[in-house]
Amino acid sequence: MITMLRAALAATAVALGGMLASPATYAQAGSAADEIEKYRQALQDGNPAELWEARGEDLWKKPGGPKNASLERCDLGRGPGVVKGAYAELPKFFADAGRVMDLETRLVWCRVNLQGMTEADARRSPFGSPERKSDNEALTAWITSESKGVAMAVSLDHPKMREAYDVGRAIFFFRGGPHDFACSTCHSEDGKRIRLQDLPNLTVKSGAQRGYTTWPAYRVSQGELRTFQWRLNDCFRQQRFPEIEFGSPASIALTTFLAYNANGAPFAAPAIKR
Amino acid sequence: MDRTLLIALASFSAVTLAGCAAMRTGADEAAIRAKAIDAMKTSFKEKGQAKLDRLNQDETQALCSQYAGKELPKDVAATIEKSNLASIRYPQDGKLVGDWKRGERIAQDGRGFQYSDDPKGPVGANCYACHQLTKQEISFGTMGPSLYNFGKLRGYTDEMRRYAWGKVYNSQAYSACTNMPRFGHAKILNEQQMRDVVALLMDPASPVNQ
């Protein structure tokens, strides 16, 4: 079923791409954008992310690791085992770990501390491929789906959260590399696009809400469900920076900045994107 | 109380408060930027051609980061433009215009300098990511202004060819903290590629000028 769905989506993408690329097409950019909007609408029926969510729920409940324990006692910030609405309040300062964590680093922490995995094993392959599915992506898909419709409510009351937000903001505006790019290069103005791809303005509430609340997402072009850590990783690749490490302090600070800016909006992922 | 004195006192307090707030914020912001840089140094690892030295900012990058999201003071803008203008090198043979067809391919190509790219190339300038250039290509971005009819509107003069070269070579020389990469200064494009991109903008036969 998923193969068929992917094939159909890919065909739509190819047809659309072909139409746009044809030099004989003298269509105005406006109508091209309309066609893209239709394509986006067509994608909304049936999201393969559900397959990741189902696998993630299994992984959460199934005993595993050297301690043969499930993750059901994992505290995502609302108490051990509470998944509902947890993602809408992350990142958060966790007293037991002594630092600010996003969901994906918290999962590493729980797999180490509850299941007895080594840190290296718990961090291995956070982003999957067709040959090697990622447990992180599946768990993240399920846990985030349990916050669907819940208003984003990240708190900066803890001084470490305030600091993470400020540091994240500075990283957002940090220009570097051969191209002088920062996150803000592409994401600090309204109504801009790269080629035909719309860019959210992440420095204003509406843009941050639209951008942040639609990750994780099933990426049609990759046939994978991608998490917010993946989103940051691939943005920095395109910025021509070195690779940002999974769950690193900079990635959590930046996530804190963006998640807090999205406060108030109903969480809307896992979504589906081109 | 004397009305003039009251106004004077009120303005004095306002100025003092604003001054203190600005000073405190300035010091705080510098401390936060230092923390951000520390966090980045421990959070990135080199991969492929993207080494950690890419996190070392030059003066332009540091100033543009510092003033991002607020108004750029005139003196800072002037400093940035002056030092970047001084960096522009024109080809020794004086030839600024190459082949617009090769320029078009460079404008379409977004590869180069990512850790996922082959360090041996090819490298493009990805002009279409941000600019409209020709009528034929409708998949263009809007981060930068439309460059359609660039040469036709401005005139095919020596002065304009030098300006086009300079702008592609180092756009910070003309517009401090612009989003546009410094293609010549950062050695993203080589001299022949620079000529070809200038040709795309300035050759009367280029589709940009049709």
Image (cartoon, coloured by chain):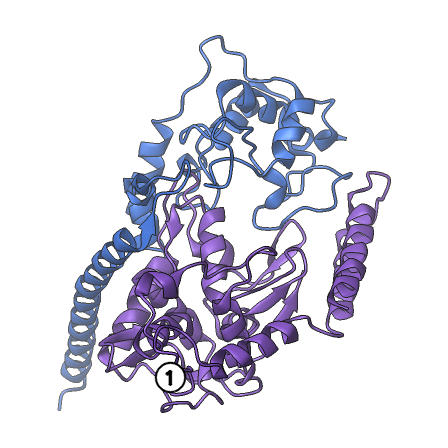
Residue B201: % across, % down: 63, 29
Residue B134 percent coordinates (x, y): 72, 37
Q: In terms of secondary structure, where does tag 1 sit?
A: loop
Residue occupying image coordinates x 30% and y 77%:
A113
Q: In the picture shown, does residue B93 fall above or below A50?
A: above
> Which of A209/A29 is in front?
A209
Q: Position of residue A66 (x, y in %)?
A: 35, 73
Q: What residue is drawn where x is 29% and y is 79%? A: A93
Q: Tell me which corner region of the image, top left, top right, bottom left or bottom right, holds residue A90.
A: bottom left
Disc tally is: 1
Q: Chain of mark 1?
A: A
Quadrant in which residue B178 is drawn: top left
| Quadrant including the C terminus of chain B | top right
Q: Position of residue B3 (x, y in %)?
A: 18, 86
Circle 1 residues within 10 Å: few <14, some 14–19, many ≥20:
many
Q: Residue drawn at (22%, 76%), measured in percent from left and top?
A: A98
Q: Is residue B73 left or right of residue B101?
A: left
For the view shown, which residue lies furthest in the top direction? B93
| Residue A249 appears in view | yes
Q: Which residue in the rendered view is the most extreme toward the right?
A: A24
Q: Which chain is blue?
A: B
Task: Say if B85 sits above or below A83 in the image.
Answer: above
Residue A188 visible (yes or no): no
Q: Name the amino acid, label 1.
A: Cys
- Identify the residue position indicated by label 1 in the image: A74
Q: Quadrant of residue A46?
A: bottom right
| Residue in the image at 44% along x and 81% along y | A63
Chain that the image shows in purple: A
Which quadrant does the N terminus of chain B fall into? bottom left
